[in-house]
Image (spheres, grey):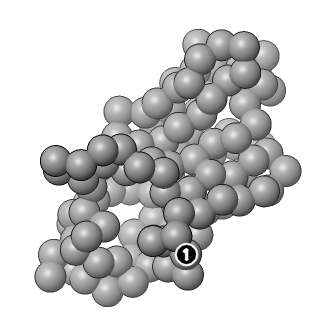
Amino acid sequence: QVQLVESGGGLVQAGGSLRLSCAASGSMFSMFSINRMGWYRQAPGKQRELVATITRGGVINYADFVKGRFTISRDNAKNTVYLHMNTLKPEDTAVYYCYAPVPGDMDYWGKGTLVTVSS
């Protein structure tokens, strides 16, 4: 069993910045089993989409629409993944979900944190 708790969402003006955090907790075996962690988002009326993922070793994958604006990072000792979002646009408004698949178990999701970007 893994718990993912996001924080850092909020209201920001276009062009502004926010940092999201996601802390994972659970059994030592589960924590050791997590390799890839990341962020997805879901805007109103749209499907959930990938934002960025990062492996334990630091291999990163970004969606094209955030390249150059968002940066994902990870603190393995704290089982925490971060999403630094810069130059935010109104179309970035969405609920952002933390994601951690555990091989041989299941995909875990956080409850989400709302990011609202005003124009």
From the image, which quarter does the C terminus lie in?
Answer: bottom left
| Residue 7 shows up from this direction | no
| Residue at 32 percent of width and 86 percent of height | 15
In the image, residue 8 above or below residue 85: above
From the image, which quarter does the N terminus lie in?
Answer: top right
Looking at the image, which residue sits at the far right?
Answer: 57
Q: Is residue 12 left or right of residue 66?
A: left
Q: Amino acid at mark 1?
A: Lys
Q: Determine the secondary structure under disc 1.
A: loop
Q: Is residue 67 left or right of residue 41?
A: right
Mark 1 surroundings: few (<14), some (14-19) or many (≥20) residues within 10 A:
few
Q: Is residue 6 left or right of residue 92?
A: right
Q: Quadrant of residue 24?
A: top right
| Residue 76 shows up from this direction | yes
| Residue at 62 percent of width and 29 percent of height | 101
In the image, residue 51 above or below residue 1: below
Q: Position of residue 51 (x, y in %)?
A: 49, 57
Q: Which residue is mark 1?
A: 67
Q: Position of residue 88 (x, y in %)?
A: 34, 77
| Residue at 30 percent of width and 44 percent of height | 47
Q: Quadrant of residue 118?
A: bottom left
In the image, residue 117 above or below residue 110: below
Q: Position of residue 66 (x, y in %)?
A: 48, 71
| Residue at 71 percent of width and 59 percent of height | 60
Q: Position of residue 102 (x, y in %)?
A: 67, 23
